[in-house]
Image (tube, coloured by chain):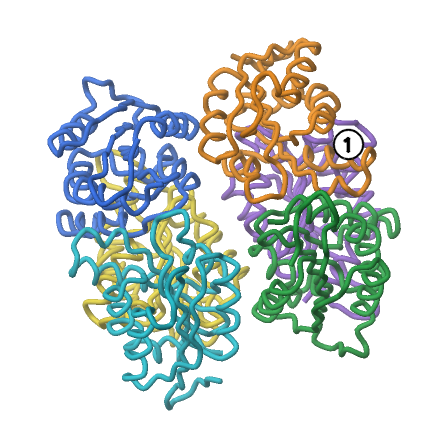
Chain colours: A blue, B orange, C purple, D yellow, E green, F cyan
Amino acid sequence: MHHRDQGDISVAASVITVSTTRTEKTDVSGETIKNLLREAGIPVVHYAICPDRVIAIRSEIHRALSEANCIIITGGTGLTHDDCTIEAVAPLLDKKMDGFGELFRLKSYEEVGTAAILSRALGGTIDGRAVFCIPGSVKGAALAVSEIIIPEIRHILRHAGR
Amino acid sequence: MHHRDQGDISVAASVITVSTTRTEKTDVSGETIKNLLREAGIPVVHYAICPDRVIAIRSEIHRALSEANCIIITGGTGLTHDDCTIEAVAPLLDKKMDGFGELFRLKSYEEVGTAAILSRALGGTIDGRAVFCIPGSVKGAALAVSEIIIPEIRHILRHAGR
Amino acid sequence: MHHRDQGDISVAASVITVSTTRTEKTDVSGETIKNLLREAGIPVVHYAICPDRVIAIRSEIHRALSEANCIIITGGTGLTHDDCTIEAVAPLLDKKMDGFGELFRLKSYEEVGTAAILSRALGGTIDGRAVFCIPGSVKGAALAVSEIIIPEIRHILRHAGR
Amino acid sequence: MHHRDQGDISVAASVITVSTTRTEKTDVSGETIKNLLREAGIPVVHYAICPDRVIAIRSEIHRALSEANCIIITGGTGLTHDDCTIEAVAPLLDKKMDGFGELFRLKSYEEVGTAAILSRALGGTIDGRAVFCIPGSVKGAALAVSEIIIPEIRHILRHAGR
Amino acid sequence: MHHRDQGDISVAASVITVSTTRTEKTDVSGETIKNLLREAGIPVVHYAICPDRVIAIRSEIHRALSEANCIIITGGTGLTHDDCTIEAVAPLLDKKMDGFGELFRLKSYEEVGTAAILSRALGGTIDGRAVFCIPGSVKGAALAVSEIIIPEIRHILRHAGR
Amino acid sequence: MHHRDQGDISVAASVITVSTTRTEKTDVSGETIKNLLREAGIPVVHYAICPDRVIAIRSEIHRALSEANCIIITGGTGLTHDDCTIEAVAPLLDKKMDGFGELFRLKSYEEVGTAAILSRALGGTIDGRAVFCIPGSVKGAALAVSEIIIPEIRHILRHAGR
């Protein structure tokens, strides 16, 4: 699926929207992420909307892992009892990239000020694939994807890939 | 899929054999477990052989969880570097049943003596379904399934089921 | 409150019943535990019924810790989503006594057979005090208190006490 | 105690000073925090000085949780063996706000340079209430409270509150 | 150092006594363990008495790991604040053998009754070597070594060894 | 070895290079770090190259801890399966300094942009000594040592030292 050499890395993306209310039609964040990826030349090979339950999120990630090496999960990262994306994903990571969440919040801080502390975000690897959890707001998702994930995904996969 | 009431609980089983060498033809433990379950009136709705890699085991469990409420994983429970079934499953459990591993080893002890300390086994629940990791030997697997899992599965699901 | 010397240890017990439906009048397990302790010459200095929420259970334990050095929590040890006694208590323990849960299940096994694997129980220490989580059934609670906790509490406090 | 709606959120604060030497008279950090909160229109409904022991800190937090929905713990965040505030609080959090500690250190860095790496700070939620651990120095405490906690507490509670 | 084949496994043992008061002359438990091992044909290639501090215990284990493939640590397994052997060793283990502690307590139970719940013991592997933490009492140590470790060490190393 | 008073703290450094290919001659990062430390008046009392295996890294750290109070481990911090420095060190830390990794990445971000998210770094204390894991690149290692570790090491040891 992907290879590691001097040359280019092929990236295949998955977008998973965690939401109990959105449909494919109303999933503006998912649509925005897919468009940003495609414009950057990254094919989106898997897309799903899944409810905010740990078992559903983990199932969808495992489906995605068989096709994609860049998995982006948007939504369910807030502070309410129902928000469980971070909790679902963290125990699955082989390596955590602390810098992803930090840089995302640093950039959010420049945009929205101290409200950035409410942004939970997580990046890491599972078996050589990159996995990112980002907020469900269009603005937050677009920031993470366009300013961090797209610029660095080939770099990450070249360093993490099997 | 399953319900919780005064009456009976319907059990639907999954059998996952963790092995890099076995095929469906040579998977004697898997075959034995399936036969024991069917004789006990428990339908086997999912069966797979998967390699001893964390990502493969977790993917197969998540596939199984959509169909079955009693998931039995056999093999990969030893002490070598490659054995990773326990490590793959433990972080996924909502509740751990310490008593399952203990009782399995107590019964093994009665059969094989102190060698029972090499038997790693694990039981617990994920989202109201029961999950068990048991050794890959025919003898060990049969012991766990016939003497503990089959007698208690309805009881467990009645207490754990959503 | 308690001391550690050649002579006797003074034990002061707390009984916390985790339940959303019981009242002081209908809390038969709590009443049974208190009676067993008093018959064994152990004063019960704190008693409360608290709902099955992590924050409520932890608050009650911290109240108990200021008065008692033997804290017994009964109920909320099952496998449903609402059962959270074990989850509330485990992260608070300084030292875990694996043997308490094991011995309780061994004794349960002798009484109820393989159904013992459903019994979750936990023992350990917090700052030199002993803390036990036991099932909410009268039979299970009585077994744990009369056959393990009462015979060993002085021994435990002599070894753990500050 | 607090509610979640279109309108305003009522905030009720608790200030806990972790120190073995300070008294109410000499607790300048605690006094500073209380004044800052009151000036911002946030009533302080609970205040305590507690020794730097895990059990004491956790007990005080549980007392505070019954009255307040914004709990600020100052002191005990250093690197010595006795500093245990972070260790006492971290396992109690339902959700961790990584951004709180990061932003606090970012702001400290701008003030004190690389010495900011010695600042341990922690933010998160317990059952829908906000909990913050901040250093015991007047300067550090004032920075955290005036520049991060006060501006964002209503925002946090609106997103986290039950 | 050790090999894994059809034939025999060579075992090289280390005995580490955790104590702040014993000397080589008064270390009866250590002496007993060494004698039992030698009588069983297992050479003791490393022996040390080390104080009950986490850093000291871990340093000694790492020294032992370069020479021995069966490391037995005796003492420091109690419930006081100073007892830290279990806490020092548990995070170092690659695989935990739950059955070792369970079987040790089961055998203790047969000898000393319910007091067995005070016995903390731990077994597991580090990089293919076996590591055991057992109580510091002569009786407890002898029980663990003669009835469990010696009979099973070759079996364990054959299954765990690299 | 080191003391804590009004006056100066004596720092003794250890440099551990994690690499399977470098020799003392080709270990440019290690050489760079040692030179930077010596220029800053900090003696390097321990130096070793060790392979990227958890057991080897932990053994070397424990050797270093008996001589040094500032231990710098360079290399093995990437995202491949073989990179295990962070995984080897994290469980050994008594206190984690989150700010060290954050500040290192903040400074990297200013130099290399978003690629900083690939930099894993870790700082904390073991028994009052400071321990840092930093990347194996000369540039990254020099940044961490000259801009963070050297300016703050005395400050850290004064606050953490026994």
Where D138 sits versus B65, above or below?
below
**Left or right: where does residue F63 sit relative to residue F11?**
right
Query: Which sits in the foreground, F5 or A148?
Result: A148
Which quadrant of the view contains residue A20? top left
Residue of label 1: C139
What percent of the width, then of the height, locates residue E35?
84, 65
Is residue C15 in view?
no
Q: Is residue B98 left or right of residue B91?
A: right
Going 73% across and 77% down the picture, which residue do you hit?
Answer: E21
**In this orientation, which residue lies closer to the viewer: A105 or E7?**
E7
Chain letter of disc 1 in the image: C
- At x 44%, y 67%, the residue is D49
Secondary structure of residue under mark 1: helix
The image shows residue A63 at horizontal and vertical percentages of 37, 25
Looking at the image, can residue C109 be seen?
Answer: yes
- Outermost residue on the right side: it is E111
- Is residue B67 positioned above or below B132 on the image? above
The image quadrant where one finds the N terminus of chain C is bottom right
- Mark 1 surroundings within 10 Å by alpha-carbon count, few (fewer than 14), some (14 through 19), many (20 or more): few
Q: Amino acid at mark 1?
A: Lys
The one of B34 and C154 positioned closer to us in this rendering = B34
Compare residues A92 and D117 and report the one nearer the observer.
A92
Residue D74's place in the image compared with B56, above or below, is below
Q: Quadrant of the C terminus of chain C?
A: bottom right
